[in-house]
């Protein structure tokens, strides 16, 4: 277990950065799974107080720095073209869930993410060297994330991929994904997270665990 995961207790506290389409849904499913959740946009929490009250009752709207400081896991649910504005020291020592996708039609051409030898989360990891990046939740739409949750053991339970280079961080995030209502399929490192990206075999696909494993050629942990 690394520095980013050694201090984690049984129920990690979660900070969701991003209060647009997907951020509030991630926050809501986490609250409903019993986690303590803070949510932040790019500015004053007053501006997301109403959205939070309506869409994510039980979550705490905060300034991003405060949300991160009080958390164990930070979820990046911001457009990738805003990522360059995230201060690496803000999330140093944290487990960081990267839900972001690179969409040039939406994000514009982002030089940092144009090197196709690397997956977008590998590039995120290089820019946040003191954080443990785990890629997941990028390949499910925000409506589905709400609707497709099922209890463990349900034959309809959908699988989501989880990829990271820090096994402890992958364990911690995998537990969260399981607890919110999905099976997990662990990929072999952040590099394999490219399989989860737009254009990959499981992007947007609703698959049970065995079909997901087959699609990515992985074995579940
Ligand atoms: N939409 C989906 O179904 C879906 C599913 C999976 C993954 N994703 C990925 O999730 C990311 C967000 O997508 P979205 O559709 O939710 O975007 P969106 O609706 O445009 O929301 C963007 C949010 O990010 C906030 N933000 C920007 N910079 C920030 C910062 N430095 N710190 C904290 N918050 C910041 C914005 O706050 P302000 O308004 O205050 O700037 C806004 O609340 C994208 O990378 C996307 O690929 C989306």
Image: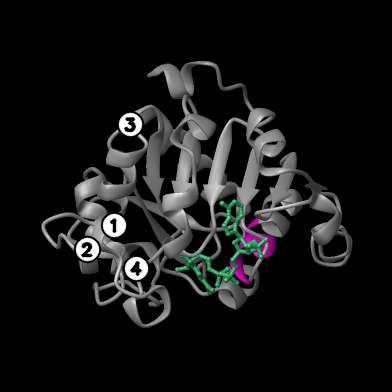
Mark 3 to mark 4: distance in Å?
Answer: 20 Å
Question: How far apart are the alpha carbons under marks 2 and 3?
Answer: 27 Å
Residue 98 in sight here:
no
Circle on res. 129:
3
- Element carrying mark 2: helix
Q: Which mark is residue 216?
A: 2
Q: Report which residue position mark 1 lands on.
A: 120
Is 198 left or right of 71, judged from the image as shown?
left
At 68% from the left and 51% from the top, the residue drawn is 30
Label whose residue precedes the other's in the sequence (1 or 2): 1
Boundaries of the magenta span: 21-26
Q: Is mark 4 within 8 Å of ligand 1?
A: yes
- Of callouts 2 and 4, which one flags the residue occurring earlier in the amino acid sequence? 4
Q: Position of residue 142 (x, y in %)?
A: 58, 72
The tag earlier along the polypeptide, 1 or 3, is 1
Q: Nearer the viewer, residue 176 or 91?
A: 91
Residue 23 highlighted magenta (yes or no): yes
Where ligand 1 lies, by image quadrant? Answer: bottom right
Q: CA distance from mark 1 to mark 4?
A: 7 Å
Quick check: is the Cβ at mark 3 less than 8 Å away from ligand 1? no
Q: Identify the secondary structure beneath mark 1.
A: helix
Q: Helix or strand or loop: what does disc 3 sit on? A: loop
- What is the number of the mark on residue 102? 4
In whole angstroms, how far apart are the C-alphas of marks 2 and 4?
20 Å
Graded by Cα atoms within 10 Å as few (under 14), some (14 to 19) or many (20 or more), the crowding at tag 2 reads: some
What predominant SS class does the magenta segment belong to? helix
Q: CA distance from mark 1 to mark 3?
A: 14 Å
Element type where label 4 sits in the image: loop
Asked whether the residues under the numbered discs 2 and 3 touch, taking CB atoms below 8 Å apart as contact, a structural biologist would say no
Q: Residue at x 39, y 44 (%)?
A: 134
Q: Kindly check if marks 1 and 4 are in contact, taking CB atoms under 8 A apart as contact.
A: yes
Among the 4 quarters of the image, the one containing residue 196: bottom left
């Amino acid at each position: 277990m690394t520095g980013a995961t050694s201090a984690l207790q049984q129920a990690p506290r979660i900070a969701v950065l991003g209060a647009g389409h997907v951020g509030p849904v991630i926050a809501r499913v986490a609250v409903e799974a019993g986690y303590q959740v803070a949510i932040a946009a790019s500015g004053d929490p007053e501006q997301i107080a109403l959205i939070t009250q309506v869409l994510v009752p039980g979550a705490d709207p905060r300034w991003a720095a405060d949300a991160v400081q009080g958390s164990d896991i930070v979820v990046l649910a911001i457009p990738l073209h805003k990522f360059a504005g995230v201060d690496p020291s803000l999330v140093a020592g944290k487990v960081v869930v990267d839900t972001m996708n690179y969409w040039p039609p939406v994000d514009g051409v982002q030089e940092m993410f144009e090197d196709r030898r690397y997956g977008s989360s590998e590039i995120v990891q290089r820019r946040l060297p003191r954080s443990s990046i785990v890629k997941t939740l990028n390949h499910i739409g925000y409506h589905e994330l709400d609707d497709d949750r099922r209890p463990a053991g349900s034959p309809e339970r959908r699988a989501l991929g989880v990829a990271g280079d820090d096994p402890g961080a992958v364990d911690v995030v995998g537990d969260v994904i399981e607890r919110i209502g999905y099976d997990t399929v662990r990929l072999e490192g952040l590099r394999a997270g490219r399989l989860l990206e737009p254009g990959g075999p499981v992007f947007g696909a609703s698959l049970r665990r065995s079909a997901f494993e087959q699609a990515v050629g992985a074995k579940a942990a």
